[in-house]
Image (cartoon, helix red, strand yellow):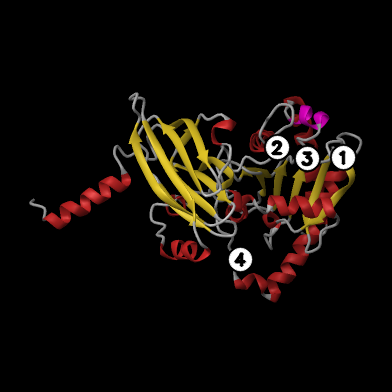
Amino acid sequence: MILSATMRRCLLGLFLLCGAPVAQAGDTPLLAYGARIAGDDARTRVVIDFDRKPVFFVHYVANPTRVIVDLPETSFGLKPEDLKARGVFTEIRYGAMGAGSSRVVLTAKKPVAITVADVKPDEAGKGFRLVLDAERVTEDRFAVLLKEQQWTGSVASTKTARVVEPPAAGSFVVAVDAGHGGIDTGAIGSETKMEEKSVTLAFAGELVAALNKESGVKAVLTRDKDEFLSLPERVQTARQHGANLFISLHADTLKQRDIRGATVYTISDKASDHLAANLAERENLSDEIAGVAFKSEPAEVADILIDLTRRETQAFSVNLARSVVSSFEGQINLINNPHRHAGFRVLQAPDVPSILLELGFLSNKEDEKLLVDPVWRRKVADLLAVAVRGYRGGAVANGG
């Protein structure tokens, strides 16, 4: 086949855009082994070193201004100080986004544009450097960038739907949601530097094992590895499994390091207190941290019938929260007023009773020691299984 000059130019352009060799989702992940950043409030350069030539896509998101760099699956062997935000950027995060995908999110003080986005061979022959030059632009210029950008090749377009096995007839399904994951590390321990996403995933595994020992109970994980799931995806996964309960696990940090103990949250339009309001606000930023645009609930959620369903579901959620607190009392350290409520987006399923459980606070030394202790995790998991058993018996007795 003979290619025309126009066709050859198009293929060459595609080759230069994507780079070669292309790292496919099934290949060994790329390795980002080094990085550096330099600049000022007007211009900033970010350089990331890879073992192989990466395919990458650059996008922009507003409110706040963020530059998103989508990559194939990448292992980030970077030191925290390697990509410490400076210059035009106030925060830089990186991590997994799902099967075969990773992402770097650079949050800026004010509108910026990427003027250089290039991959160059390392002079020492060790691999390749991704070079990104960012500079301040006007609001109008940034608005044009948002309007004209194409999201072809983004993580959003490469994520595949999960295959969910239908539950066995008569099973009581509990969806266990390990908070955070992938690019969203969550809180970080003050002593151990343990990331919240790892704490919640380890505990989620213990809880699923404990629940699956209960007769007639089938426990499932919303995520079983270090990957990012948006808040709506977590709820959707639970509903796809036909969940009868949804338990989201967290271990945040607070400025007041003396506060410790477990807390159980249910959803409410009005927060029970400032602590609940602040935690809900932070947890609801999970999608924003990963560069995922906020999507409003579909119009039908406002329908009166679903609203009535939500009210009934909320009552069951409160019953579950009370059962957890009752099971923990005298066994596990609880915060003052351990049942609280606020507007957590991850608890918004209108037909699945849901709670968010703060296992403890990584900002407190005593809590942190317990959160990384497998013996303590097993004890708490067993107590939660008892709480679910008690809730289930009460729901059946009441026709739920």
Secondary structure under the numbered disc 2 in the rendered image: helix
> Where in the figure is residue 128, as x and y percent of width and height?
36, 33
Q: Is residue 50 above or below residue 155?
A: above
Depth check, front residue: 280 or 108: 108
Element type where label 1 sits in the image? strand
User: Foreground mark, 4 or 3?
Assistant: 4
Residue 395 visible to an observer of this rendering: no
**Cα gap from disc 2 to disc 4, whole angstroms:** 31 Å
Which label sits on residue 296? 4
The C terminus - image quarter: bottom right
Residues under labels 1 and 4: Cα distance? 34 Å
Image height check: is 315 above or below 211?
Answer: below
* Dots 1, 4 in contact, CB < 8 A: no
- Identified at 80% across, 32% down, the residue is 367
Between the residue at mark 3 and the residue at mark 1, the CA separation in whole angstroms equals 14 Å
Q: Secondary structure at mark 4?
A: loop
- Where does label 2 land, which residue? 207
Which residue is most to the bottom?
Answer: 304
Label 1, on which residue? 334
| Residue 367 falls inside the magenta stretch | yes
Chief SS of the magenta region: helix
Mark 2 vs mark 4: give the one in front.
4
Q: Picture coordinates of residue 215 (x, y %)? A: 71, 41
Labels 2 and 3 touching (C-beta < 8 A): yes
Q: Amino acid at mark 1?
A: Leu
Residue 22 visible in rendering: yes
Number of the front mark, 1 or 2: 1
Amino acid at circle 2: Leu
What residue is shown with label 3?
384
Q: Residue at x 50, y 51 (%)?
A: 67
First-in-chain label (4 vs 3): 4
Which residue range is magenta in the image?
A: 365-371
